Amino acid sequence: MQDGATVREKSYHFAVRIVKLCLWLKEKQHYELSGQLIRSGTSIGANVQEAAASHSRKDFFYKMALASKEARETHYWIRLLRDCDILTDKQSTSLLDECEELIKMLTSIVKTGNSKTKN
């Protein structure tokens, strides 16, 4: 399983990048897309942080599963921004890579939790 501190740090730094991107999107008057992206992109880290304070294993894995879903939604919005030519390939590549890394980490954590609850 991935180290919890690692996913917390990565999701926090990713959220910082998302906030900065959303500020830029608002400057370009892409208000609706900015709103969708900021909600999902910052929710990843918020759910990971909440998981760290979970009162049970079930709650921990539930919060991590929510973070995973939010990461997948964020990946969608970044791809949409790229494919609508709002972001360039260059602008979107590192964000997509970072988001994919978070998805893999969170999926691994959730799968570990699911396998332990079935045993």
Image (cartoon, grey):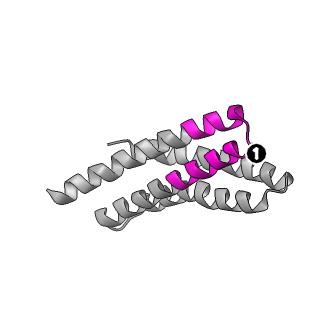
Where residue 59 appears, as percent x and y from the top left, is 35, 66
Label 1 element class: loop
Question: Can you tell which quarter of the image residue 26 is in?
Answer: bottom right
Which is nearer the eye, 4 or 115? 115
94 in magenta? yes
In what quadrant of the picture does the C terminus appear?
bottom left
The reply to whether residue 81 is in sight is: yes
Task: Answer left or right for 1 relative to 64.
Answer: left
In what quadrant of the picture does the N terminus appear?
top left
Which is nearer the eye, 43 or 88? 88
Pointer 1 residue: 86
Where residue 52 appears, as percent x and y from the top left, is 42, 57
53 in magenta? no
The reply to whether residue 16 is in sight is: no
Where residue 93 appears, as percent x and y from the top left, is 63, 34
Task: Answer left or right for 76 relative to 63.
Answer: right
- Magenta residues, start to end: 71-97
Task: Answer left or right for 38 relative to 104.
Answer: right
Which is nearer the eye, 63 or 31? 31
